[in-house]
Amino acid sequence: MSGSVPVVPVAPIDVSGPRVPMYTPQFAADPHRAYREMREKYGALAPVELAPGVPATLVLEYRTAVRILNDPERFPADPRVWQEGVPADCPVLPMMQWRPNALRNAGNVHARYRQTNTAGLAGIDQFGLQSVVERTAVSLINAFCASGSADLVRDYAFPLSFEVLNHLLGCPADIAGQAAEGFRAIFEGVGAETGNKLLVGALQRLALHKRAQPGDDVTTRMLEHPARLTDTEMVHQLATLYGAGIEPQQNLIINTLLLILADGRFGGIVLGGSLSTRDALDEVLFDDPPMANFCISFPRQPVLVEDRWLPANQPVVVSMAACNTDPAIRAGQLAGNRSHLAWGAGPHSCPASSLAYLIAQEAIDQLLDALPEIRLAVPLGELAWRPGPFHRALVALPVRFTPSAPLPERI
Protein backbone atom coordinates (compact mmCIF):
# COMPACT_ATOMS: atom_id res chain seq x y z
CA MET A 1 0.00 0.00 0.00
CA SER A 2 1.32 3.41 -0.97
CA GLY A 3 2.77 5.37 1.94
CA SER A 4 2.96 2.40 4.28
CA VAL A 5 5.94 2.14 6.63
CA PRO A 6 8.22 -0.76 5.76
CA VAL A 7 8.59 -3.42 8.42
CA VAL A 8 12.19 -3.68 9.60
CA PRO A 9 12.95 -7.23 10.71
CA VAL A 10 14.63 -7.71 14.07
CA ALA A 11 16.70 -10.69 15.11
CA PRO A 12 16.55 -12.62 18.36
CA ILE A 13 19.60 -13.30 20.42
CA ASP A 14 20.79 -16.66 19.07
CA VAL A 15 19.72 -19.06 21.81
CA SER A 16 20.81 -22.19 19.95
CA GLY A 17 24.30 -21.34 18.73
CA PRO A 18 27.57 -21.34 20.68
CA ARG A 19 27.81 -19.14 23.75
CA VAL A 20 30.85 -17.52 25.30
CA PRO A 21 31.72 -19.33 28.57
CA MET A 22 32.46 -16.83 31.35
CA TYR A 23 33.55 -19.34 33.99
CA THR A 24 36.81 -20.61 32.48
CA PRO A 25 40.40 -19.80 33.46
CA GLN A 26 40.90 -18.50 29.91
CA PHE A 27 38.14 -15.92 30.35
CA ALA A 28 39.50 -14.90 33.77
CA ALA A 29 43.02 -14.47 32.37
CA ASP A 30 41.99 -11.87 29.76
CA PRO A 31 38.34 -10.80 30.02
CA HIS A 32 38.89 -7.52 28.19
CA ARG A 33 39.92 -9.42 25.09
CA ALA A 34 36.72 -11.46 25.38
CA TYR A 35 34.65 -8.27 25.75
CA ARG A 36 36.25 -6.76 22.63
CA GLU A 37 35.69 -9.92 20.60
CA MET A 38 32.07 -10.20 21.76
CA ARG A 39 31.40 -6.54 20.98
CA GLU A 40 32.86 -6.94 17.48
CA LYS A 41 30.82 -10.08 16.80
CA TYR A 42 27.53 -9.35 18.57
CA GLY A 43 27.35 -5.62 19.24
CA ALA A 44 25.66 -4.46 22.45
CA LEU A 45 24.32 -7.87 23.54
CA ALA A 46 26.18 -11.17 23.56
CA PRO A 47 25.07 -14.77 24.26
CA VAL A 48 27.09 -16.17 27.17
CA GLU A 49 27.13 -19.03 29.67
CA LEU A 50 27.53 -18.12 33.34
CA ALA A 51 28.14 -21.78 34.23
CA PRO A 52 27.78 -24.96 32.20
CA GLY A 53 24.19 -25.06 30.99
CA VAL A 54 23.29 -21.61 32.40
CA PRO A 55 22.65 -19.26 29.43
CA ALA A 56 22.45 -15.48 29.77
CA THR A 57 22.70 -12.29 27.75
CA LEU A 58 25.68 -10.03 28.52
CA VAL A 59 25.28 -6.26 28.04
CA LEU A 60 28.48 -4.80 26.58
CA GLU A 61 27.59 -1.19 25.67
CA TYR A 62 27.32 1.63 28.20
CA ARG A 63 24.21 3.43 26.96
CA THR A 64 22.30 0.16 26.59
CA ALA A 65 23.25 -0.79 30.14
CA VAL A 66 22.10 2.55 31.56
CA ARG A 67 18.72 2.19 29.87
CA ILE A 68 18.29 -1.35 31.22
CA LEU A 69 19.38 -0.42 34.75
CA ASN A 70 16.85 2.42 34.82
CA ASP A 71 13.96 0.32 33.47
CA PRO A 72 12.94 -2.03 36.31
CA GLU A 73 9.49 -2.55 34.81
CA ARG A 74 10.81 -4.36 31.74
CA PHE A 75 13.95 -5.63 33.50
CA PRO A 76 12.90 -6.75 36.99
CA ALA A 77 15.41 -8.25 39.38
CA ASP A 78 13.13 -11.07 40.55
CA PRO A 79 14.57 -14.46 39.39
CA ARG A 80 11.91 -16.82 40.76
CA VAL A 81 10.53 -18.03 37.43
CA TRP A 82 14.06 -18.51 36.05
CA GLN A 83 15.32 -20.49 39.04
CA GLU A 84 12.48 -23.02 38.86
CA GLY A 85 14.46 -24.85 36.18
CA VAL A 86 17.88 -24.50 37.82
CA PRO A 87 19.32 -27.44 39.80
CA ALA A 88 20.06 -26.82 43.47
CA ASP A 89 23.78 -27.54 42.99
CA CYS A 90 24.22 -24.99 40.19
CA PRO A 91 27.42 -23.09 41.10
CA VAL A 92 25.99 -19.64 40.31
CA LEU A 93 22.56 -20.15 41.88
CA PRO A 94 23.45 -18.71 45.33
CA MET A 95 24.61 -15.48 43.66
CA MET A 96 21.44 -15.22 41.55
CA GLN A 97 18.55 -16.84 43.38
CA TRP A 98 15.60 -15.01 44.88
CA ARG A 99 15.97 -13.81 48.43
CA PRO A 100 13.78 -11.44 50.47
CA ASN A 101 16.19 -8.54 50.03
CA ALA A 102 16.47 -5.32 48.04
CA LEU A 103 18.70 -6.88 45.39
CA ARG A 104 16.15 -9.45 44.19
CA ASN A 105 12.85 -7.55 44.49
CA ALA A 106 11.07 -4.58 42.95
CA GLY A 107 8.41 -1.97 43.74
CA ASN A 108 7.21 -1.51 47.31
CA VAL A 109 8.95 -4.67 48.50
CA HIS A 110 12.27 -3.40 47.15
CA ALA A 111 11.68 0.03 48.72
CA ARG A 112 10.99 -1.49 52.15
CA TYR A 113 14.19 -3.50 52.12
CA ARG A 114 16.34 -0.73 50.67
CA GLN A 115 15.12 1.82 53.20
CA THR A 116 16.07 -0.56 55.99
CA ASN A 117 19.54 -1.09 54.54
CA THR A 118 20.21 2.59 53.94
CA ALA A 119 19.05 3.46 57.47
CA GLY A 120 21.46 0.92 58.90
CA LEU A 121 24.34 2.28 56.83
CA ALA A 122 23.46 5.94 57.43
CA GLY A 123 24.26 5.63 61.12
CA ILE A 124 27.92 4.81 60.44
CA ASP A 125 30.30 7.48 61.71
CA GLN A 126 32.73 7.90 58.82
CA PHE A 127 35.43 9.42 61.02
CA GLY A 128 35.09 6.49 63.38
CA LEU A 129 35.18 4.11 60.42
CA GLN A 130 38.42 5.64 59.21
CA SER A 131 39.94 4.99 62.64
CA VAL A 132 38.73 1.38 62.58
CA VAL A 133 40.33 0.83 59.17
CA GLU A 134 43.57 2.43 60.35
CA ARG A 135 43.78 0.28 63.49
CA THR A 136 42.97 -2.87 61.53
CA ALA A 137 45.50 -2.01 58.81
CA VAL A 138 48.30 -1.30 61.27
CA SER A 139 47.67 -4.55 63.13
CA LEU A 140 47.78 -6.56 59.90
CA ILE A 141 50.87 -4.76 58.57
CA ASN A 142 52.68 -5.41 61.84
CA ALA A 143 52.08 -9.14 61.39
CA PHE A 144 54.23 -9.26 58.24
CA CYS A 145 56.32 -6.06 58.02
CA ALA A 146 59.43 -7.66 59.54
CA SER A 147 59.43 -10.56 57.07
CA GLY A 148 60.03 -8.55 53.90
CA SER A 149 57.29 -10.33 51.96
CA ALA A 150 53.54 -10.93 52.01
CA ASP A 151 50.56 -12.02 49.97
CA LEU A 152 48.37 -8.94 50.08
CA VAL A 153 45.20 -10.94 49.36
CA ARG A 154 45.61 -13.44 52.21
CA ASP A 155 47.56 -11.25 54.65
CA TYR A 156 45.96 -7.87 54.15
CA ALA A 157 42.96 -7.13 51.91
CA PHE A 158 40.76 -10.08 52.86
CA PRO A 159 41.26 -9.94 56.64
CA LEU A 160 40.93 -6.15 56.61
CA SER A 161 37.66 -6.18 54.68
CA PHE A 162 36.37 -9.01 56.84
CA GLU A 163 37.26 -7.41 60.18
CA VAL A 164 35.98 -3.96 59.25
CA LEU A 165 32.62 -5.29 58.04
CA ASN A 166 32.20 -7.43 61.16
CA HIS A 167 32.90 -4.35 63.28
CA LEU A 168 30.24 -2.38 61.41
CA LEU A 169 27.70 -5.21 61.80
CA GLY A 170 28.56 -5.94 65.43
CA CYS A 171 29.30 -9.55 64.52
CA PRO A 172 31.15 -11.80 67.02
CA ALA A 173 34.24 -13.61 65.74
CA ASP A 174 32.81 -17.15 65.79
CA ILE A 175 29.75 -16.17 63.76
CA ALA A 176 31.92 -14.13 61.40
CA GLY A 177 34.19 -17.11 60.70
CA GLN A 178 31.26 -19.29 59.64
CA ALA A 179 29.86 -16.51 57.42
CA ALA A 180 33.25 -16.03 55.73
CA GLU A 181 33.57 -19.73 54.96
CA GLY A 182 30.11 -19.77 53.39
CA PHE A 183 30.64 -16.68 51.26
CA ARG A 184 34.00 -17.87 49.99
CA ALA A 185 32.35 -21.05 48.65
CA ILE A 186 29.54 -19.02 47.05
CA PHE A 187 31.88 -16.64 45.23
CA GLU A 188 34.20 -19.43 44.12
CA GLY A 189 31.26 -21.50 42.86
CA VAL A 190 32.82 -24.58 44.48
CA GLY A 191 30.55 -26.21 47.02
CA ALA A 192 28.22 -23.25 46.62
CA GLU A 193 25.13 -25.07 47.93
CA THR A 194 26.93 -26.00 51.16
CA GLY A 195 28.37 -22.51 51.38
CA ASN A 196 24.92 -21.01 51.10
CA LYS A 197 23.72 -23.14 54.04
CA LEU A 198 26.74 -22.13 56.13
CA LEU A 199 26.13 -18.48 55.40
CA VAL A 200 22.42 -18.56 56.20
CA GLY A 201 23.09 -20.41 59.46
CA ALA A 202 25.69 -17.85 60.53
CA LEU A 203 23.48 -14.89 59.74
CA GLN A 204 20.54 -16.43 61.60
CA ARG A 205 22.80 -16.59 64.64
CA LEU A 206 23.84 -12.95 64.15
CA ALA A 207 20.25 -11.69 63.89
CA LEU A 208 19.24 -13.55 67.06
CA HIS A 209 22.38 -12.35 68.85
CA LYS A 210 21.69 -8.67 68.06
CA ARG A 211 18.03 -8.95 69.06
CA ALA A 212 19.23 -10.18 72.46
CA GLN A 213 22.23 -7.82 72.70
CA PRO A 214 21.61 -4.66 70.62
CA GLY A 215 24.45 -2.21 70.04
CA ASP A 216 25.61 0.78 68.01
CA ASP A 217 25.90 -1.16 64.76
CA VAL A 218 24.29 -1.65 61.37
CA THR A 219 22.52 -4.87 62.37
CA THR A 220 20.83 -3.29 65.39
CA ARG A 221 19.71 -0.23 63.43
CA MET A 222 18.16 -2.48 60.77
CA LEU A 223 16.40 -4.58 63.42
CA GLU A 224 15.01 -1.43 65.03
CA HIS A 225 13.84 0.14 61.73
CA PRO A 226 10.07 0.80 61.48
CA ALA A 227 9.86 -1.78 58.66
CA ARG A 228 10.14 -4.42 61.43
CA LEU A 229 11.88 -7.09 59.40
CA THR A 230 11.48 -10.70 60.45
CA ASP A 231 14.51 -12.78 61.38
CA THR A 232 14.36 -14.45 57.96
CA GLU A 233 14.28 -11.08 56.21
CA MET A 234 17.16 -9.85 58.36
CA VAL A 235 19.26 -12.86 57.38
CA HIS A 236 18.97 -11.90 53.74
CA GLN A 237 19.70 -8.21 54.30
CA LEU A 238 22.84 -9.27 56.17
CA ALA A 239 23.74 -11.66 53.34
CA THR A 240 23.59 -8.73 50.92
CA LEU A 241 25.89 -6.67 53.14
CA TYR A 242 28.36 -9.55 53.47
CA GLY A 243 28.24 -10.12 49.72
CA ALA A 244 29.06 -6.47 49.03
CA GLY A 245 31.35 -5.80 51.96
CA ILE A 246 33.97 -8.54 51.82
CA GLU A 247 34.71 -10.00 48.39
CA PRO A 248 34.17 -6.84 46.28
CA GLN A 249 35.89 -4.68 48.92
CA GLN A 250 38.88 -7.01 48.95
CA ASN A 251 39.05 -6.99 45.16
CA LEU A 252 38.83 -3.20 44.98
CA ILE A 253 41.78 -2.86 47.34
CA ILE A 254 43.86 -5.53 45.57
CA ASN A 255 43.12 -4.39 42.01
CA THR A 256 44.05 -0.83 42.93
CA LEU A 257 47.28 -1.94 44.60
CA LEU A 258 48.11 -3.97 41.52
CA LEU A 259 47.64 -0.91 39.33
CA ILE A 260 49.85 1.18 41.59
CA LEU A 261 52.59 -1.45 41.80
CA ALA A 262 52.56 -2.66 38.19
CA ASP A 263 51.97 0.48 36.15
CA GLY A 264 55.06 2.69 36.11
CA ARG A 265 53.04 5.65 34.86
CA PHE A 266 50.48 5.32 37.61
CA GLY A 267 52.66 3.98 40.38
CA GLY A 268 55.25 6.66 40.01
CA ILE A 269 52.66 9.42 40.08
CA VAL A 270 50.70 8.01 43.02
CA LEU A 271 53.74 7.31 45.16
CA GLY A 272 55.09 10.71 44.20
CA GLY A 273 51.98 12.34 45.56
CA SER A 274 50.74 14.28 42.51
CA LEU A 275 47.84 11.88 41.82
CA SER A 276 45.65 10.66 44.65
CA THR A 277 44.77 7.15 45.71
CA ARG A 278 41.18 8.16 44.92
CA ASP A 279 42.18 8.63 41.27
CA ALA A 280 43.81 5.21 41.23
CA LEU A 281 40.61 3.74 42.65
CA ASP A 282 38.57 5.40 39.93
CA GLU A 283 40.76 3.99 37.19
CA VAL A 284 40.29 0.51 38.64
CA LEU A 285 36.53 1.06 38.93
CA PHE A 286 36.56 1.80 35.20
CA ASP A 287 38.92 -0.91 33.97
CA ASP A 288 38.86 -3.74 36.51
CA PRO A 289 35.86 -3.22 38.81
CA PRO A 290 35.69 -5.78 41.63
CA MET A 291 32.31 -7.00 40.39
CA ALA A 292 32.96 -7.03 36.66
CA ASN A 293 29.65 -8.55 35.56
CA PHE A 294 26.50 -8.35 37.67
CA CYS A 295 23.35 -6.16 38.02
CA ILE A 296 21.26 -9.12 36.85
CA SER A 297 17.66 -8.81 35.65
CA PHE A 298 15.10 -11.34 34.44
CA PRO A 299 12.61 -10.02 31.82
CA ARG A 300 9.15 -11.53 32.32
CA GLN A 301 8.46 -11.53 28.58
CA PRO A 302 10.53 -11.18 25.40
CA VAL A 303 11.99 -7.65 25.24
CA LEU A 304 13.26 -5.79 22.18
CA VAL A 305 16.62 -4.14 22.86
CA GLU A 306 19.01 -2.79 20.22
CA ASP A 307 17.21 -4.63 17.40
CA ARG A 308 17.42 -7.90 19.35
CA TRP A 309 14.70 -9.85 21.12
CA LEU A 310 15.84 -10.98 24.54
CA PRO A 311 14.07 -14.16 25.70
CA ALA A 312 11.75 -14.16 28.71
CA ASN A 313 12.99 -15.43 32.07
CA GLN A 314 16.63 -15.65 31.05
CA PRO A 315 19.27 -13.63 32.91
CA VAL A 316 20.41 -10.30 31.49
CA VAL A 317 23.79 -9.48 33.02
CA VAL A 318 25.38 -6.04 32.79
CA SER A 319 29.14 -6.16 32.19
CA MET A 320 30.29 -3.12 34.11
CA ALA A 321 33.86 -3.79 32.96
CA ALA A 322 32.90 -3.96 29.27
CA CYS A 323 30.52 -0.99 29.46
CA ASN A 324 33.08 1.18 31.22
CA THR A 325 35.56 0.53 28.40
CA ASP A 326 32.97 0.95 25.62
CA PRO A 327 34.76 2.93 22.87
CA ALA A 328 31.56 4.90 22.26
CA ILE A 329 31.86 6.68 25.61
CA ARG A 330 35.41 6.15 26.80
CA ALA A 331 37.51 9.28 27.17
CA GLY A 332 41.24 9.22 27.79
CA GLN A 333 41.25 11.13 31.09
CA LEU A 334 39.95 9.20 34.08
CA ALA A 335 41.22 11.38 36.95
CA GLY A 336 38.19 12.82 38.70
CA ASN A 337 35.81 10.92 36.40
CA ARG A 338 33.07 9.08 38.33
CA SER A 339 30.82 8.06 35.42
CA HIS A 340 31.68 4.35 35.63
CA LEU A 341 29.02 1.72 36.33
CA ALA A 342 31.01 -0.14 38.98
CA TRP A 343 28.37 0.73 41.59
CA GLY A 344 25.49 -0.01 39.21
CA ALA A 345 22.83 2.59 38.37
CA GLY A 346 19.11 3.11 38.84
CA PRO A 347 17.04 1.81 41.76
CA HIS A 348 19.48 -1.00 42.58
CA SER A 349 22.67 1.10 42.65
CA CYS A 350 25.00 0.44 45.57
CA PRO A 351 24.01 2.49 48.65
CA ALA A 352 27.42 2.05 50.28
CA SER A 353 29.78 3.35 47.59
CA SER A 354 31.12 6.21 49.74
CA LEU A 355 31.95 3.74 52.53
CA ALA A 356 33.68 1.40 50.08
CA TYR A 357 35.79 4.28 48.76
CA LEU A 358 36.75 5.32 52.30
CA ILE A 359 37.74 1.81 53.40
CA ALA A 360 39.76 1.08 50.26
CA GLN A 361 41.51 4.45 50.24
CA GLU A 362 42.49 4.27 53.89
CA ALA A 363 43.67 0.66 53.55
CA ILE A 364 45.86 1.48 50.55
CA ASP A 365 47.29 4.66 52.05
CA GLN A 366 48.17 2.92 55.32
CA LEU A 367 50.03 0.17 53.46
CA LEU A 368 51.95 2.49 51.13
CA ASP A 369 52.88 4.83 53.96
CA ALA A 370 54.15 1.95 56.08
CA LEU A 371 56.01 0.16 53.25
CA PRO A 372 56.97 2.78 50.65
CA GLU A 373 59.45 0.43 48.90
CA ILE A 374 56.84 -2.28 48.31
CA ARG A 375 57.04 -4.02 44.92
CA LEU A 376 55.66 -7.05 43.11
CA ALA A 377 57.44 -10.30 44.00
CA VAL A 378 56.71 -12.00 40.67
CA PRO A 379 56.45 -10.85 37.04
CA LEU A 380 53.06 -9.40 36.17
CA GLY A 381 52.36 -12.25 33.75
CA GLU A 382 52.64 -14.84 36.53
CA LEU A 383 49.74 -13.43 38.54
CA ALA A 384 46.63 -15.61 38.32
CA TRP A 385 43.00 -14.45 38.25
CA ARG A 386 40.29 -16.52 39.92
CA PRO A 387 37.77 -17.96 37.45
CA GLY A 388 34.14 -16.95 37.80
CA PRO A 389 31.60 -15.00 35.76
CA PHE A 390 31.02 -12.17 38.21
CA HIS A 391 34.16 -11.07 40.03
CA ARG A 392 37.53 -9.69 38.94
CA ALA A 393 39.79 -11.17 41.58
CA LEU A 394 43.42 -12.19 41.88
CA VAL A 395 44.32 -15.52 43.46
CA ALA A 396 47.22 -13.83 45.26
CA LEU A 397 49.25 -10.61 45.14
CA PRO A 398 52.77 -11.50 46.37
CA VAL A 399 55.00 -8.53 47.24
CA ARG A 400 58.45 -7.80 48.63
CA PHE A 401 59.69 -4.84 50.63
CA THR A 402 62.47 -3.80 52.97
CA PRO A 403 61.79 -5.42 56.37
CA SER A 404 60.77 -2.85 58.94
CA ALA A 405 59.93 -2.59 62.63
CA PRO A 406 56.27 -2.78 63.68
CA LEU A 407 54.24 0.41 63.64
CA PRO A 408 52.87 1.88 66.87
CA GLU A 409 49.33 0.56 67.30
CA ARG A 410 46.47 2.79 68.32
CA ILE A 411 44.26 1.62 71.14
Image: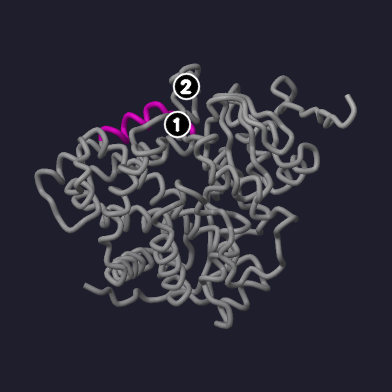
Q: Residue at x 81, y 30 (%)?
A: 8
Say which amino acid is labelled 2.
Val
Magenta span main SS: helix
Does 380 sit left or right of 238 as displayed?
Answer: right
Does 117 sit left or right of 260 as displayed?
Answer: left
**Residues at circles 1 and 2 in contact by the CB criterion of under 8 Å:** yes
Residue 30 is situated, as x and y percent measured from the top left of the image, at: 69, 46
Q: Residue at x 66, y 40 (%)?
A: 27
Q: Give the residue pinned by disc 1.
A: 78
State whether residue 6 is above or below residue 292: above
Q: Is residue 172 visible?
A: no
Q: Give the residue pinned by disc 2.
A: 81
Image quadrant where residue 255 sits: bottom right
- Element class at badge 1: loop
Q: Would you say residue 62 sits in the magenta stretch?
A: no
Say which amino acid is labelled 1.
Asp
Classed neighbour count for the residue bearing mark 2: other residues with Cα under 10 Å, few (<14), some (14–19), many (≥20): some
Does 395 sit left or right of 167 as displayed?
Answer: right
Residue reaching furthest right? 2
Q: Would you say residue 196 sits in the magenta stretch?
A: yes
Q: Residue at x 57, y 76 (%)?
A: 270
Q: Who is closer to the viewer here, 28 or 390?
A: 390
Residue reaching furthest front? 2
Classed neighbour count for the residue bearing mark 1: other residues with Cα under 10 Å, few (<14), some (14–19), many (≥20): many
Q: Who is closer to the viewer here, 73 or 232?
A: 73
Residue 74 is situated, as x and y percent measured from the top left of the image, at: 54, 34
